[in-house]
Image (cartoon, rainbow, N blue to C red):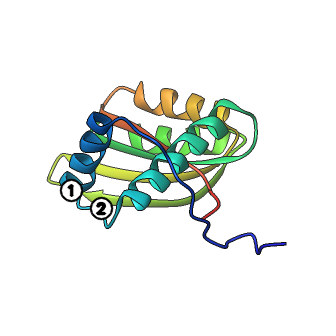
Amino acid sequence: MSPPNETVRFGVSLPLSLLQELDGKVIAQGRASRSEFIRDLIRERLIREKWAGDEDVVGVLTIVYDHHQRELPSRITEAQHSHYLHTVCTTHVHLDHDACLEVIIIHGKPSDIERLSTQLGGLRGVKFSKLTRTSRVET
């Protein structure tokens, strides 16, 4: 039996026009090869499927907010504590006199992470909010 991380070659048949479009994407994105591009597409699909399920995943929530908004920093912290999630790490950056950027790495169920993302994004004084969905994937 083969080791689980052994690389296996296999053939894929594509119409020439699709192959040319693939090669254009590989070049435009500076990928090392078609294989690396296709591996990344597969990983993205696997992550999307994990987020559609109920197993633990990881989310990276990026928010930009007005730190002069009354009690907003404490509301952000309180919301993180009120959900059944594990906040792995929070990074806080002062962008200028008024704006702060916060990146929150969260581990938990997809629905709980999305609920927290929606709650934080909807707070008064939050100027930008984006949830990046990711998870551990096999290499």
Quarter of the figure with the N terminus: bottom right
Q: Residues within 10 Å of mark 2 (few under 14, many from 20)?
A: few
In the image, is 118 to the left or to the right of 63?
Answer: right
| Residue 124 in view (yes/no) | yes
Are the residues flagged by discs 2 and 1 in contact, CB closer than 8 Å? Answer: yes
Task: Tell me where residue 42 appears, x and y as whole percent.
Answer: 53, 47
At horizontal 25% and vertical 40% (from top left) the residue drawn is 21
| Figure label count | 2
Quarter assignment of residue 139:
bottom right
Distance Cα–Cα, label 2 vs label 1: 6 Å
Q: Is residue 122 above or below residue 2?
A: above
Q: In the displayed image of the protein, which residue is found farthest to the right?
A: 1
At horizontal 75% and vertical 35% (from top left) the residue drawn is 54
User: Mark 2: which secondary structure?
Assistant: loop
User: Mark 1: which secondary structure?
Assistant: helix
| Residue 66 in view (yes/no) | no
Q: Which residue is mark 1?
A: 27
Q: Which mark is residue 115?
A: none
At horizontal 62% and vertical 57% (from top left) the residue drawn is 136
Q: Which residue is mark 2?
A: 31
Quarter assignment of residue 65:
top left
